[in-house]
Image (cartoon, helix red, strand yellow):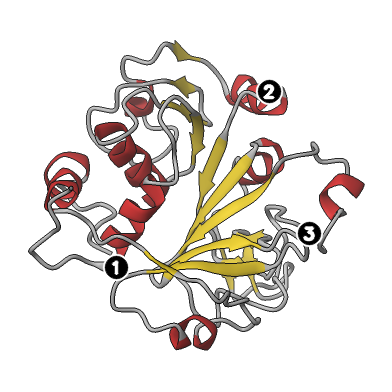
Amino acid sequence: MSEMATQEYSTIEQMAVAASKLIEDGTTVLTGTGLPIIAVALAMKTHAPNLTVVFEAGGIAPRIPVLPISVGDSRSSYKAIMATSLDYVMGSAQQGYIDYGMLGGAQMDVYGNLNTTVIGPHDKPKARLPGSGGANDLGSLCWRTIIIMQQDTRKFVNKLDFLTTPGYLEGPGSREEMGLPAGTCPYRVVTQLGVFGFDEITKKVMLLSLHPGVAVEEVNKNSSFEIKIPAQIDRTAAPTAEELRLLRDEIDPAKFILRK
């Protein structure tokens, strides 16, 4: 049995650990910038040493020496088996070679659709965000998409200000109607409150597990849309002391991400 952490940990460390455990050894993951890289690196150092990491700028299966600051950082191709191109990477996803896509978002709706483009009207936004990058391709083409983001009523919204990355679009059958590959789908959402999935019938967000210390009432209190709460709810495991050591001492010692 793993040694449980005795020291305190942050919500972002809890999110990184929970997200890392969603990825199985021997699979392929296309990762976005920031916390997704942290989660992928932790998975490789713990239970998934044979994970194949792919960066959208072209690095395939690198041995990440220290945390890349972006998916185009040269460190994302360090000792990679290939240093190729965005076109090659997205073509690989289109051909079905990428098991998981992992990315963040500024807004998400009940069907797992994401906005990372603008807050407010597109032509005169209140804030202009990084945009799609590879996020649309990732959510459209990878078999399963894992979303990591903070949760509150401004981020879990009834209607996106802009649709950047497709989830289940308007509900059951919508992805297929739009021509997206059958079988691809949003899979899990990890927030500071818990881990979420999607109802098999309605395709709407539903709670799967609560993080330690989180009350079930906080889930819908921090969402503008109603989240399904099943009768059986699991509890997310707290980070172990070893997981925290890896995060703090080896993966992000400069605290580029973990300081947030």
Whether label 2 touches label 3, CB < 8 Å: no
Disc 2 versus disc 3: nearer the observer: 3
Q: In which quarter of the image is the C terminus?
A: bottom left
- Amino acid beneath label 1: Thr
Image coords of residue 107 (percent x, y):
59, 68
- Amino acid beneath label 3: Leu
In front of the other: 215 or 1:
1
- Amino acid beneath label 2: Gly
Check the image and report above or below for 110 versus 38: below
Compared across the picture, whether 95 is left or right of 254 comes to right
> Residue 184: which disc?
none
Q: Which residue is drawn at 55% across and 40% down?
A: 101
Decide which of tag 2 and tag 3 comes sooner along the chain: 2
Count numbered badges in the picture: 3
Check the image and report above or below for 221 versus 96: below
Q: Mark 1 points at which residue?
A: 11
Image coords of residue 141 (percent x, y):
69, 36
Inspect this view and state whether residue 33 appears: yes
- Seen as rendered, the residue at the extreme right is 177
User: SS of the residue at dot 2?
Assistant: helix
Q: Which residue is drawn at 59% across and 46% down?
A: 145
> Which corner quadrant of the image does residue 51 belong to?
top left
Q: Which residue is drawn at 33% across and 38% down?
A: 43
User: SS of the residue at dot 3?
Assistant: loop
Image coords of residue 34 (percent x, y):
39, 49
Compared across the picture, whether 81 is left or right of 103 comes to left
Disc 2 versus disc 1: nearer the observer: 1
Check the image and report above or below for 176 versus 4: above
Q: Name the residue under label 3.
A: 169
Compared across the picture, whether 199 is left or right of 173 comes to left
How far is the residue under mark 3 from the one under mark 1?
29 Å
